[in-house]
Image (spheres, rainbow, N blue to C red):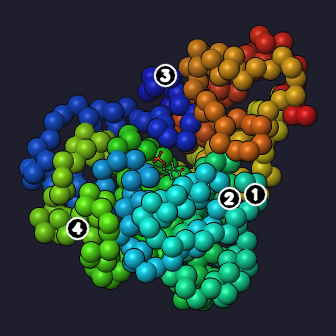
Amino acid sequence: MTTDGNVPYLLTPGPLTTSAATKQAMLRDWGSRDKDFIALTAEIRERLVSIAGVADSHTVVPVQGSGTFAVEATLGTLVPRDGKVLVLVNGAYGRRMLTILERLGRAATSVETAEDVPIDPAVVDAVLAGDPAITHVAAVQCETTSGILNPMGEIAAVVAVQGRRLIIDAMSAFGALPTETTDYDALVASSNKCLEGVPGLAFAILRREVLSASADNAPSLSLDLHDQWRGFEANGQWRFTPPTHVTAAFAAALRDHAAEGGVDGRGARYRENCRILIDGMRAMGFEPLLSTALQAPIIVTFKMPADDKFDFETFYDRLAARGFVIYPGKLTEAASFRIGCIGHLGSDEMHGAVGAARDVLKEMGVTSGAPA
Ligand SMILES: *Cc1c(COP(=O)(O)O)cnc(C)c1O
């Protein structure tokens, strides 16, 4: 993939490195109400629902903005004023959903575990059994804070048995990891993660009968997914100015995704990227925060090395100077840094990143990346 000339390579959880074809697709202008753009919008909606495998029961509502816009729009549209949401939290994105619900004035409670511990479906079961006021459960599939994978299939099963509605933030998983269930009212993701589009568009995959019963729930006009959906159904058009170039790039990225073999093909490449990264970093003494069983092949959190000569700012700057941009800060409570394995990158780039890290360590005089 090196031939794409994508330097700098973004080893971050999005925005991420995109293909030449995806960037190329932005080199024309589109009339937002022109039939060509209407067809492009229909194409992305169809491709997304087909990736999810829920074309019979669900519909896709794209929304302008980053992933959080779609999470906020989904919670605001689907949770009625007298609803109550149980949010499953083991990182920043679960916590963000609690903040959104507070702003929306919707009742919420949470089940929380440490950032390196997956959500326990048995605990969810017990909390739901004890609180009949809870109408919805909101869960994060891959908590990008640490890169941990939550057991979405088991969580969905518990929510179904307890007769509540499920909302999944699959932002950093959709397109590369199977969702493990189709039994959800909403799955939310965005253009610029595993689907490898450019940022500016997010979407929710919504159960049609639930969405059609959600008129007048949303406290926001621009983030009302019921209204947005009615617009698409009426004439195929976005209600308000769409991100036309982003949409065109997303269509190109989705064609790449299909050509790579869909979720299986994309997931296989990311798993290999992740393996090269972890093996290479381990060989220098670095240690991932998570055990292999909990690690999603999306982003890897490494514990901060103990060596006094290791300075993260220097490490970051010198990797960037070599064309490899990693994540410039930590979200976890543990002293750590993160390197992504998603985006239009393959084994050449991952070996390149590991080699660059080795060179930078040598320059800094660090003999081992081992943590304390
Ligand atoms: C990226 C991400 C989001 C959305 O973040 P934005 O910065 O708004 O795009 C939400 N949830 C998860 C799990 C994510 O990885």
Q: Which residue is mark 1?
A: 114
Residue 328 in view here: yes
Q: Which mark is residue 7?
A: 3
Please state which amino acid type lies under the numbered disc 3: Val
* Residue at horizontal 64 percent and vertical 62 percent from the top: 89
Please state which amino acid type lies under the numbered disc 4: Asp
Question: Are the residues at dot 3 and dot 1 in contact (C-beta closer than 8 Å)?
Answer: no
> How far apart, in angstroms, are the residues tagged by discs 4 and 1?
38 Å
> How far apart, in angstroms, are the residues tagged by discs 3 and 2?
33 Å
Please state which amino acid type lies under the numbered disc 1: Ala
Give whichever of 106, 150 is nearer the camera. 106
Query: On screen, 295 above or below 197?
Result: below
- Mark closer to the observer (3, 2): 2
Whichever of labels 2 and 1 marks the residue nearer the N terminus, that label is 2
Whichever of labels 4 and 1 marks the residue nearer the N terminus, that label is 1
Whichever of labels 3 and 1 marks the residue nearer the N terminus, that label is 3
Question: Are the residues at dot 2 and dot 1 in contact (C-beta closer than 8 Å)?
Answer: yes
Place of residue 283 in the rendered image (x, y in percent of width and height, measured from the top left): 83, 31
Q: SS class of the residue under badge 2?
A: loop
- In the rendered structure, the answer to whether residue 8 lies left or right of residue 220 reads right
Whichever of labels 3 and 2 marks the residue nearer the N terminus, that label is 3
Q: SS class of the residue under badge 4?
A: helix
- Mark closer to the observer (3, 4): 4
